[in-house]
Image (cartoon, rainbow, N blue to C red):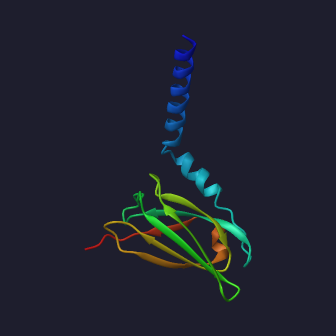
Amino acid sequence: MRKFLASAMIIMALSLAGMAQEDGSQQSREEAARLAKAPAEVDGIGRAVVFVSDENGNPVKGAYATLESTWGGDHYCESFGSTGREGSIALLPIHMGTLRLVVKAKGYQTSRTNVSTSSLSEPVRVTLTRKS
């Protein structure tokens, strides 16, 4: 009986954690935006929060984002990943230098954008255009 109760409690905890992660509310978007704080100075280390949407403002799930950084002449690093259900991703850590954001998604044209380090105090918003 103890094993059954322990198993039931574990399953319930995992289910609740999964539901919390799937919350698609405006509050979760605001939380991600609040986490977008990054240092503005060159050669600092920080993160970038990226929101990807289509022309209608709908989030693009599964978009692949790469943030490339070059600094100090010959140093290079990149941070990459895919957007979640809300169309957002936090790319970290990144070295603050010359930044270029590349976003790709199936059925959309690739977006290439230069990003200034000073703009990373706010989320980077990318709008993808559907391929014709």
Q: Is residue 126 above or below residue 17?
A: below
What residue is shown at x 52% (from left), y 42% (from top)? 21
Residue 88 location, x and y as percent?
51, 58
- The foreground one among 4 and 99 is 4
Query: Which quarter shows the N terminus?
Result: top right
- The foreground one among 64 and 5 is 5
What residue is shown at x 47% (from left), y 69% (from top)? 126
Residue 122 visible at all:
no
Query: Which quarter shows the C terminus?
Result: bottom left
13 on left or right of 117? left
Residue 20 location, x and y as percent?
53, 38
Residue 54 visible at all:
yes
Residue 77 occupies quadrant:
bottom right
What residue is shown at x 50% (from left), y 37% (from top)? 18
Task: Name the outermost residue toward the bottom.
Answer: 73
Residue 123 location, x and y as percent?
58, 64
Residue 72 occupies quadrant:
bottom right
Q: Is residue 81 above or below residue 4?
A: below
Instruction: Give the number of callouts.
Output: 0
109 on left or right of 121? left
Task: Name the outermost residue toward the left.
Answer: 132
What residue is shown at x 38% (from left), y 66% (from top)? 105
17 on left or right of 42? left
Residue 130 location, x and y as percent?
31, 69
